[in-house]
Image (tube, rainbow, N blue to C red):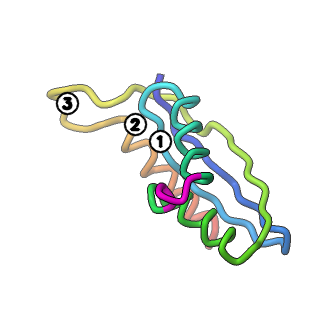
Amino acid sequence: TSSVYQADVLTEDGESYSYIGLAEGDFKTRWRNHNKSFRADRYRNETELSKLIWELKDKEIECELGWRALAACGSCTAGSEFCSLCLTEELLILKKQVLCR
């Protein structure tokens, strides 16, 4: 099953950031890849989340990271006019932007 997830970053000085992403297939593999990008400098630009984590590291700002599932859905299928996984991610990002105004 594919999923849309959210990562919440909270810095030691109280700033918070949210990242919404998708995992085609199991989330555990995606989570491992994120963690790899936080540890190895050569992957620092792999995702927007890793860019943020490295920016904080470069400034020597400690942070905590929490994960949560937002939705489970089917992944892309060949011949389909749309991808329900991608559309779900986009909808959740748009909803979050509206709620944050």
In percent of the image, x 73 and y 66: which residue is there? 16
Q: Position of residue 11 (x, y in %)?
A: 78, 67
Disc with the residue nearer the chain's start (1 vs 2) = 1
Rounded to the nearest whole Å, what is the CA distance between mark 2 and mark 3? Answer: 12 Å
Location of the C terminus by quadrant is bottom right
Reply above or below: 81 against 74. Answer: below
Check residue 43 for magenta coloring.
yes
Query: Which residue position holds label 3?
Result: 80
Query: Which residue position holds label 2?
Result: 85
Residue density around tag 2, few if under 14, some if 14–19, many if 20 or more, within 10 Å: many
Residue density around tag 3, few if under 14, some if 14–19, many if 20 or more, within 10 Å: few
The mark lying in front, picked from 1 and 2, is: 1
Query: Which residue position holds label 1?
Result: 22
Q: Amino acid at mark 2?
A: Leu
Q: Position of residue 10 (x, y in %)?
A: 77, 62
In percent of the image, x 70 and y 77: which residue is there? 59
Q: Amino acid at mark 1?
A: Leu
- The residue furthest top is 1
